[in-house]
């Protein structure tokens, strides 16, 4: 397998782009080597500029749940393009997507569309503060909620991969209202409430996906919600990754917990830039123009992006691939565990529906600290062997792998062969 054209583009990209990437998670900093340049995708697979084909388990970090270029989505977007790209005025498609979203999440009476997950969360946080009149927010170590200043502390994969404690350029003042708790540890939340009386709410990935996959244990979310409500604080679910992916109604549907404020992104736009935040009427009526919480966007509810989102969610609802995800996810989990056993390599596999990943550790992984016991050098060797055998993975130990409904039996065979080769390579380290 040759990467000549990717190498050439990478060098060219370095001139006018930062590290030749527009998001640091795309850099290969923690696995070595240089990032690949992708030419096109179709269904479950992508092709790089050198003509190498891969089964895609990155899927744009989640959005491409139907696989690449689904014909229904392509048709809807082409149709929307004919009417114009943006108006700065309302279009019918916004109402249609809002209805689909509010029907899927019973806790959402109203929704506001934005352009990214980051925007959705920063607005959701502002809304929690506006509604409660309190300033402090608790987040969990290892959860990532986008790159807004206030939440760029103890923020999982991108930062863990680059070994940064937080980020330069974030002033102390910006994080002084952010408190950190441990995932799956309600006492660490309660402790903050003993010390502070101005906590607006807790933001959580209901299933952790940005420290690798980390699953809420027992009744963690239910108990967290009950506790928060006893303190008149809000549960803010960051379902940017899990929304429409864990189930059509997100992780909240699977886990049976309804959040006060829900933040969405990724799948909701089907590959186009869409984010959203929503809640029951009482809370959403705080948002301008109904209320005093200001939040705006020139391209918010963009008609092309709305068309991408509507067609993706309609097709997703029709396909209802969640049983298939469970089945395929389990197959890949078994493939990983069997190959690791065959070559005597200790791994832990965490999986929640169509999100999974192996950690190169023997420790059970239930929080960020556990995840960090992983051997990232082993992951780097594993990663490159998977690439060379035709499987595209996120270039970090601390990222989830994603499944699309377009994955085939042949793809799973490719994953199986690649995994065997990759575990063999790890065993020879
Ligand atoms: C990806 C992600 C975000 C940020 O979304 P962007 O569209 O990258 O800004 C926020 N929260 C979670 C849980 C995510 O996975």
Image: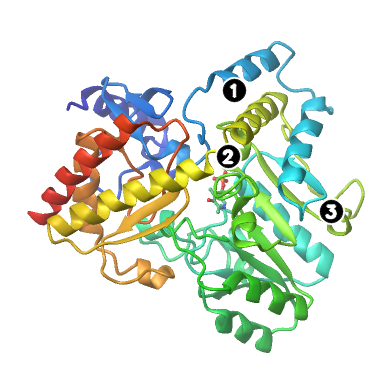
Residue under label 3: 284
Residue under label 2: 267
Identify the residue at image location x=90%, y=45%. Answer: 289
Residue under label 1: 73
Nearest the camera: 260 or 410? 410
Check residue 47 in the rendering and tell me which mark sits there, or answer none: none
Q: Nearer the viewer, mark 1 or mark 3?
A: 1
From this viewpoint, is residue 69 visible?
A: yes
Cβ of disc 3 within 8 Å of ligand 1? Answer: no
Identify the residue at image location x=21%, y=64%. Answer: 346
For disc 3, the neighbor class at 10 Å (few under 14, some 14 to 19, many from 20) is: many
Instruction: From this view, report whether residue 11 is shown above or below residue 134.
Output: above
Image quarter hosting the N terminus: top left
Identify the residue at image location x=66%, y=31%. Answer: 314
Give the residue furthest to the right: 290
* Left or right position of 248 against 131: left
């Amino acid at each position: 397998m040759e990467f000549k054209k990717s190498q050439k583009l990478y060098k060219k990209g370095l001139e006018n782009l930062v590290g030749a990437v527009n998001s640091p998670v795309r850099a290969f900093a923690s696995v070595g080597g240089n990032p690949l340049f992708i030419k096109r995708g179709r269904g479950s697979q992508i092709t790089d500029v050198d003509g190498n084909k891969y089964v895609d388990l990155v899927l744009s970090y989640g959005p491409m749940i139907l696989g690449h270029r689904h014909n229904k989505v392509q048709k809807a977007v082409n149709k929307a393009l004919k009417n114009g790209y943006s108006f700065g005025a309302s279009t019918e498609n916004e109402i249609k997507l809002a209805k689909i979203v509010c029907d899927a999440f019973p806790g959402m009476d109203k929704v506001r569309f934005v352009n990214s997950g980051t925007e959705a969360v920063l607005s959701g946080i502002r809304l929690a503060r506006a509604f409660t009149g309190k300033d402090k927010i608790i987040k969990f170590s290892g959860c990532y909620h986008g790159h807004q200043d206030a939440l760029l502390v103890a923020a999982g994969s991108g930062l863990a991969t680059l070994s940064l404690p937080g980020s330069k350029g974030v002033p102390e003042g910006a994080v002084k209202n952010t408190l950190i708790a441990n995932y799956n540890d309600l006492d660490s939340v309660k402790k903050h409430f003993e010390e502070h009386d101005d906590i607006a709410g807790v933001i959580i990935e209901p299933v952790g996906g940005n420290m690798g996959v980390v699953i809420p244990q027992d009744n963690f979310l239910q108990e967290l919600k009950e506790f928060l409500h006893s303190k008149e604080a809000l549960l803010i679910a960051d379902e940017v990754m899990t929304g429409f992916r864990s189930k059509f109604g997100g992780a909240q549907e699977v886990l049976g917990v309804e959040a006060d404020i829900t933040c969405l992104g990724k799948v909701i736009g089907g590959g186009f830039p869409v984010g959203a935040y929503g809640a029951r009427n009482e809370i959403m009526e705080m948002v301008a123009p109904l209320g005093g919480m200001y939040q705006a966007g020139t391209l918010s509810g963009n008609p092309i992006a709305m068309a991408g989102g509507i067609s993706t969610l309609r097709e997703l609802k029709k396909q209802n691939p969640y049983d298939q995800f469970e089945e395929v996810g389990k197959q890949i989990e078994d493939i990983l565990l069997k190959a690791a056993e065959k070559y005597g390599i200790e791994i832990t596999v965490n999986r929640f529906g169509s999100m999974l990943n192996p950690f190169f550790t023997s420790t059970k992984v239930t929080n960020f600290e556990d995840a960090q016991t992983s051997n990232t050098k082993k992951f780097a060797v594993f990663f490159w062997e998977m690439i060379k055998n035709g499987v595209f993975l996120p270039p970090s130990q601390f990222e989830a792998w994603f499944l699309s409904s377009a994955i085939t039996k042949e793809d799973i065979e490719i994953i199986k062969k690649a995994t065997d080769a990759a575990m063999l390579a790890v065993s020879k380290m």
